[in-house]
Amino acid sequence: MPERIETEAFGNPANQAIFMVSGWAMPKEVMRSFAMRLSQRFHVVVANLPGISLNEEWISRTRIGPNYDIDALSEQLIEAAPKDAWWLGWSLGGMVSVYVAARRSSQVKGLITLATSPSFVARQDWPFGMSVEVFDAFAVSIQRSPAEGLKRFTMLQAQNSGNERDLAKQLQSYLPTHTLLPAALIGGLRLLKSLDVRREWSLLDCPNLHLFGGKDALVSSHALVQQEGMNPFQQCVELSQCTHALFLEEEEECVRYIENYIDANTP
């Protein structure tokens, strides 16, 4: 059976585990420096979403199939994750991690999300997401020219940064240009559009920390930071000068929040 989740591990397996899930279209290598920094204290396992990889051999063996069905994807990630781990997800990886933490709580010790919204697209009772029209237009651009669409995506991630051009170039250097699998991009976009984890977000009963970029052009933190305190297990923090790739912009600050939060919630 072909592998569906590609992972990479850092640090001492005897330490507390963190299972890190990357975002849409971005391979785990974009989080490698962040993972290595966290691995000074934790055992960190970083996972790609299905069909996203810089490894040509791995891509040649992969099959998308039902991998972007949320329940199938949840099971695949649980199988790849260390036991008794904190889950840390970025963007779409964070949404999926929220879903797992709420519905399979015995599998998740605690939850941390980065630049993650409960609903990426706007809905009738959720005006804080991207409009469906803009999202659909982006999806069409990905279908027409995946490589150009991904470049545009990196620019959106870096938008509003004080170092916008350099950050966009850094993100572009991680794009899977030689291992591009359009089916994975489209499957991920379909999930990103359909997934709505607002109910799961409100029902989380494990410690959960959510870090946002105050200048993020893709995810608005306003509604969620305003709701802090509604769930006693939850903390929301806005890094006012950061954009969507906050762990690249402020690695040390993100690490400090994560270390302090895990320490505060470890008996």
Image (tube, rainbow, N blue to C red):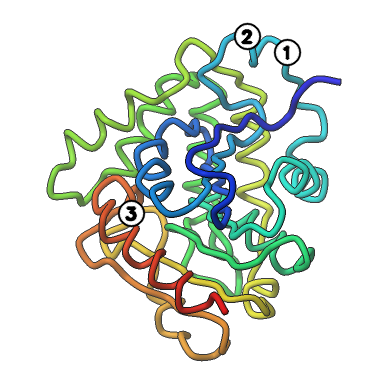
Q: Residues within 10 Å of mark 3 (few under 14, many from 20)?
A: some
Q: Earlier in the sequence, mark 3 or mark 2?
A: 2
* Residue with the most extreme right position: 1
Name which residue type carries label 3: Ala
Name the mark nearer the viewer: 1 or 3.
Answer: 1
Q: Nearer the viewer, residue 234 or 138?
A: 234
Q: Quadrant of residue 76?
A: top right
Residue 217's disc is 3
Q: Residue furthest front?
A: 14
Q: Is residue 225 above or below residue 165?
A: below
Residue at mark 1: 61
Residue topped by disc 2: 57
Residue type indicated by callout 2: Glu
**Is residue 19 shown above or below 65?**
below
What amino acid type is highlighted by mark number 1? Arg
CA gap between label 1 and label 2 equals 7 Å
